[in-house]
C-alpha cells in the first residue's frame, strides 16, 4: 500500500517537476501582459482569471493528496467534494478565459508547488492538520479574490463571482467545522 501511495503521489507531482525550470503562472501573466499592451485582453480580467485558475489547480492537487493520505473520513470526504467543485469551477474559468483569448497557467507557481510537495511528505494526523491549514488559507485567499472581483465590469466574471462566491464561503465553513 505504501508503494502505491508513493507512486500515486509521484504521478500527481510529475507534471510540476517537468516544468520546474519555468513558472507556469509567471508565463501566463507575461503572455497576458503582452496581449494587454496590444489591447487584445483586459488586464484586470486576465489577472483575476489567472489567479482563480491557479487556486483551483492548487486546491484540486491538494485534495487529491488528501483523498489518498487523509487520516480521517471527514478530511477525505471534504477533499472529494473539493475536487468535484473545484474542477467544475475551473472548467467555467477556462471557458471564460478562452472566449477572451486569455492565457491560463497549466500548473501552479513554483512557490505553491513547493508547498504541495511539503504536504505530500506528511502522513496521518500531521497530514490532516497541514491539509486543513493550507486549504483554509487558500479558501480565505479565494474569498478575498472573488469579493474583490465584484468590482470588475466584465459580465461573465460577475457571473462567475455570483455563482461561486457562495460555494467558496460554504467550503470554508465546512473546513472550519472539520478543524474543530
Image (cartoon, rainbow, N blue to C red):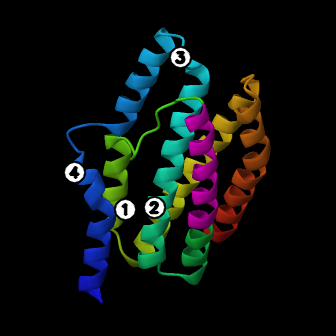
Q: Disc 2 vs disc 1: Cβ atoms closer than 8 Å?
A: yes
State the residue at coordinates (38%, 46%).
Answer: 112
Q: Position of residue 80 (x, y in %)?
A: 57, 72
Q: Which residues are magenta?
A: 82-99
Q: Where's the C terminus, which quadrant?
A: bottom right
Q: Position of residue 90 (x, y in %)?
A: 57, 50
Residue visible at 60% across and 64% down in the picture? 82
- The N terminus sits in image quarter: bottom left
**Disc number lying in front (2 or 1):** 2
Quarter assignment of residue 21: top left
- Residue pointed to by mark 1: 119
> Does the stretch in magenta take in 147?
no
Can you identify the residue that label 4 sits on? 18
Q: Earlier in the sequence, mark 4 or mark 1?
A: 4
Residue 90 among magenta residues: yes
Instruction: Please report contact status of discs 1 and 3: CB closer than 8 Å, yes or no.
Output: no
For the residues carrying marks 1 and 3, which lies nearer the camera in this image? 3
Q: Which residue is mark 3?
A: 40
User: Marks 4/2: CA distance?
Assistant: 18 Å
For label 2, the residue is: 62
Closer to the eye: label 4 or 3:
3
Instruction: Compute the Cα span from label 2 to label 3.
Output: 34 Å
Task: Tell me which corner region of the image, top left, top right, bottom left or bottom right, holds residue 117.
Answer: bottom left
Disc 3 secondary structure class: loop
Q: Nearer the viewer, residue 172 or 155?
A: 155
Amino acid at each position: 500500500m505504501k508503494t502505491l501511495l508513493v507512486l500515486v503521489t509521484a504521478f500527481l507531482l510529475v507534471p510540476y517537476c517537468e516544468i520546474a525550470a519555468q513558472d507556469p503562472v509567471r508565463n501566463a501573466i507575461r503572455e497576458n501582459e503582452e496581449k494587454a499592451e496590444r489591447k487584445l485582453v483586459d488586464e484586470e480580467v486576465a489577472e483575476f482569471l489567472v489567479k482563480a485558475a491557479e487556486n483551483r489547480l492548487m486546491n484540486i492537487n491538494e485534495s487529491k493528496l488528501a483523498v489518498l493520505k487523509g487520516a480521517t473520513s471527514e478530511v477525505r470526504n471534504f477533499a472529494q467534494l473539493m475536487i468535484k467543485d473545484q474542477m467544475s469551477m475551473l472548467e467555467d474559468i477556462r471557458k471564460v478565459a478562452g472566449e477572451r483569448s486569455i492565457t491560463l497557467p497549466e500548473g501552479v507557481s513554483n512557490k505553491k508547488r513547493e508547498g504541495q510537495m511539503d504536504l505530500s511528505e506528511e502522513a496521518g494526523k500531521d497530514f490532516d492538520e497541514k491539509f486543513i491549514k493550507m486549504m483554509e488559507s487558500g479558501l480565505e485567499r479565494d474569498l478575498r479574490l472573488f469579493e474583490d472581483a465584484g468590482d470588475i465590469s466584465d459580465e461573465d466574471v460577475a457571473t462567475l463571482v455570483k455563482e461561486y462566491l457562495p460555494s467558496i464561503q460554504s467550503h470554508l465553513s465546512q473546513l472550519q467545522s472539520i478543524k474543530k
